[in-house]
Image (tube, rainbow, N blue to C red):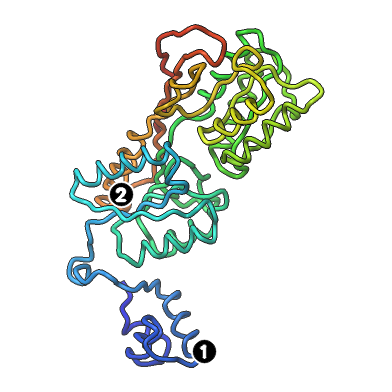
Amino acid sequence: MATMADVARRAGVSVATVSHVLNETRPVLPHTRQAVLDAMEELGYTPNTLARSLVTSRTRSIGLAVSAISNPYFTEILQGVEAAALEHGYSLLIADPHDDPVHERKVVQLLHERRVDGMIVAPSADPRELLAYLGRHKVPAVLLDRVVDAPADGSTGFDQVCADSAEPTARLVTHLAGLGHRRIGLVAGLPGLSTTSERLAGYRDGLAAAGLAHDEGLVVHGNSESPGAEQATTALLSLTSPPTALVTANNAMTMGALRSLRDHGLSVPDDIALCCFDDFAWADLFSPRLTAIAQPSRDIGAQAVSVLLDRLAAPDRPARTVRLPCTFVHRTSCGCPEQSLTSVKGTAS
């Protein structure tokens, strides 16, 4: 691991000058400052803000970077991560990248500078800078919820933990088709996220399995947020032939869709059926109660910690992707009476 002295030698300055650049304790000429920053980047040097890591090189801490911490889904994941981390004697440092690639890169660097032993990150729709930083600095990391393709250069990539998305979404579509619906709309998430593309694929698979044609006009993007979903649902309702059933691709978008349906005076399921991806604590308090796909949020968080600890123990082992099964929660917003829960199988690789 590079030291401040290494940076000073590479930049051709004193250790004191490096310290001034890092701590901004004294003005440094712009070209000298840039030389120091370039040397830090070339050597992979990051400031050590925890004194004990000078001795052990371990801080017994894990960095967690997830967007929309206020989202119940990520809140439950956080609880799973925290419980598993504490069980193994690790503390947790949390940052919110806000699904912004530039901010994502910054918060991950800040966590790295805190000398966390490893990171758990839910990547944005454009994670190139994130992945480049993690790879360049050899940060032990697990990608959470949203998966990325294996590198084209044949390198091992990153460990990943997520829930199934495609098959459960197809299950929602075939369920609605089985109730007689032929125009089934989808409020999809933010383009670029793997969860969005996988749920889109599941939607198409469900239509095909039901013998229904795929109509691009019935797919709108709510960008994984409530306001976007409200606008997207309004666009669907304005069609000459609007959908008779709707699938929303996460819990925040379900809220936006319901708001739009209410504003248009539509009743669920009498006027339009609704199924949603993501169950949440108050889903069965609505009238009607929401038929949903429940993700094993806490288990996802706990599994991510387990995979990260495996990586710390064996840094050179092959990367793996773990997918956990979801559960189909059959309530009444689809137009059906209550039934018992039915498991939707998942896979691990």
> Is tag 1's residue or tag 2's residue first in the polypeptide sequence?
1
Q: Position of residue 145 (x, y in %)?
A: 45, 40
In the rendered image, the quadrant that contains the C terminus is top left
- From the image, state whether disc 1 or disc 2 is nearer to you: 1
Mark 1, residues whose alpha carbon is within 10 Å: few (<14), some, or many (≥20)? few
Residue 214 is situated, as x and y percent measured from the top left of the image, at: 72, 23
Residue, disc 1: 30
Name the amino acid type tagged 2: Arg
Place residue 294 in its image quadrant: top left
Contact, mark 1 vs mark 2 (Cβ under 8 Å) = no
Q: Nearer the viewer, residue 298 or 44?
A: 298
> Residue at position x 47%, y 48% from top?
67
Quadrant of residue 265 in the image?
A: top right
Dot 2 crowding, Cα within 10 Å, few <14, some 14–19, many 20+: many
Nearer the observer, 290 or 266: 266
* Secondary structure found at label 2: helix
Q: Position of residue 292 (x, y in %)?
A: 49, 22
- Looking at the picture, does residue 120 appear above or below residue 74? below
Quarter holding the N terminus? bottom left
Q: Is residue 315 left or right of residue 185?
A: left
Distance from the alpha carbon under mark 1 to that under mark 2: 40 Å
**Residue visible at 55% across and 24% down in the picture:** 169
Residue that appears at 66% across and 15% down = 271
Of 16 and 7, nearer the camera is 16
Drawn side of residue 310 relative to residue 66, left or right: left
The amino acid sitting under disc 1 is Pro
> Against 301, is 51 above or below?
below
Give the number of the disc on residue 294.
Answer: none
Identify the mark at residue 311; answer none if there is no mark: 2
The x, y position of residue 297, in whole percent, is: 38, 34
Q: Residue at x 30, y 64 (%)?
A: 115
